[in-house]
Image (spheres, rainbow, N blue to C red):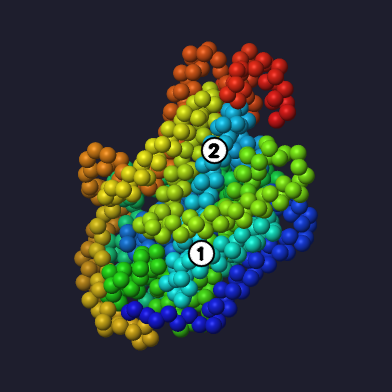
Amino acid sequence: MAYTRTIGVVDYVVMCAVLLVSASVGVIFSRTGGRQKTTREYLLANRDMGFLPVALSIIVSYISGIMILGYTTEIYQHGIQIVMFNLFNILAYVISAFTFVPFIRKLQITSSFEYLERRYRSKTVRRLGSLLGILSATLYLGTATNATATAVEAVTDLPTWASIVIVSTVCVFYTTLGGIKAVLWTDVFQFVVMVTAMLAILIKGYITIGGMSPAWDAMAAGDRLNFFVFDPSPTTRHSFWTMLIGTTFLSIGFSCFNQASVQRIGSVKTDKDAVKAVLMNAPFLLVLTVPAALCGIAVYTHYTLLRCDPLKMKYVKNENELLAYYVMDVLQDLPGVPGLFIAALMSGALSSNSSSLNGIAAILWEDFLKYRYGKISDWKAALIAKITVIVFGGIGTLVAFMVTLIGGTIFQIALGFDGATNGPLFGLFFLGILCPFANWQGALTGGATSVAILLWLNIGSQLTSSTSYNPILPSVPSDRCEINATVNETWTYDVTTVWNAQSNVTTLGAVMSGTGSQSYSGLNGFYATSYLYYSPLGILTTVLVGAAVSAIINRYTRRQPYFDKNLVLSPLRRFVHSKTKYAYELEATPPTEDSCQAALTDS
């Protein structure tokens, strides 16, 4: 079953064509329109984009090659439950579209962290949020690049470092030249590439295994139709509850408060277009993730019927190369298809990375450099943003090399990073929007406490042997690897693998309950917390600690925070103290009422 890499000239042509088109978009937008000479055009596309490219851009910025590779690995090793991720993502999009998107649109902001300063009247809170946002974007930048490079190495002679450098260079090139417009339209092209590649894999894959019926039987026999697991333990890696709570909170935060999403929400023409753009995430998500899940089922079925597990036999270096191995194993006789698959992975990385880089440029200019260099001409400000893209493109490349040292599936690594950094960040937004009495002292205390707890949790989980509990599933048999020893021969499927296990199918109904989680003692239980709980834990810590500290300070000083009523959700505005003798202005001594009113008028 171990193969010799035989990617052909046609495959390289397809790969290069996709990279060339992506780079060309940047050149086109650098020579058209305003030529990206203003920050409004470079970062917000002059607020003149249609909702369809924006919707596609939001979803591919979040999906990337991490989803394509991660779904296959998750289903192969842990079962179908990962598809519940889709259900709760859709729930989050609906909540976001009708609750938070209109709220964000009315603020007319470029950096999402402008809200934090206006709400808490504190530059320090804004900068805390900005640093967390930059850290989150940089980590995701490196993770997405590493995922692609790992898979490319599995199917070509390109080493990981070369793939990382190529993807990073192309991404920095078109993002620097074309700004947000290049990012949006390149995302549309890359969406088409990803869908086309997965459809090609599906068609060939299911023809090979004989259709969906054998696949369903194999999944059932392998105990992998575990759609619902109602284990309430927070140490269970994937359950109905971890998916519901973790995915919903993370997706709401990402679709509304993430810098890339705020820029896209602000780039469309009208409020209705912004709502439609977020709602359209739901069908576009399914267009990408359903084929990704079906690819995972096809891969599992193929090697189950073949009775040869590439992971157990060490045919791949790690589990994240599994789909790439399958593509070369099954589709290498179709010229161009392996190249299209690699192009899809590169497209996923490019879409995520360009969004991250453009978002970092917006954050750094709006939240840090604008205060110091705000009087320079707009074209110089745009130039600074472009330099920022280049610098952080290099930093993201270094992070991509560091990710290789972390164990686990790429899907878990990415969402673990997201939860650990975005949990405290999104908590600052939720605290400000939902708690009219919250002040800057509470926000800083809550945010800092949340960061400390999640940093402790992440370091502890890496340094100890405590891991989240996974129900043990039957492994793929590997007793016929020698029979199917060469990649070019006709595969010999052993259908008894499925039929001998049919007695188990009756116990696999649509619902599984109580998987009997492992017991942990002391801090090991804390370190074994599911990675999907990182984000809600960060949000909850920030909100609870921030609200408690704010309430204590307000009661002790007999003062209430003073800010514009439009900075909280409309049902809560009647609780805002819009006129009071006292106010919190940054971290200084409370100013007079007149100065507060003047500040509000200016904003």
Under mark 2, the amino acid is Gly
Q: Residue shown at 63%/66% (left/top)?
A: 22
The residue nearer to you, when weighing 485 against 435, is 485
Q: Quadrant of residue 542?
A: top left
Relative side of 516 to 388, left or right = left
**Label 2's element?**
helix
User: What number of labels is visible?
Assistant: 2
Examine the rendered structure and indicate whether residue 592 appears above or below residue 247: above
Location of the C terminus by quadrant is top right
Label 1: how many residues lie within 10 Å, few (<14), some (14-19) or many (20+)? many
Across and down, in percent, residue 148 comes to: 48, 65
Q: Quadrant of residue 405?
A: bottom left
Residue in view at x 22 percent, y 63 percent? 504
- Alpha carbon separation for disc pair 1 and 2: 29 Å
Q: Position of residue 560 (x, y in %)?
A: 56, 18
Res. 529 visible in picture: no
> Which of the 4 image quadrants contains residue 505?
bottom left
* Residue under the image location 47 percent in, 26 percent down: 547
Residue corresponding to mark 2 = 129
Residue assigned mark 1: 164
Identify residue type, mark 1: Ile
Residue at disc 1, secondary structure: helix
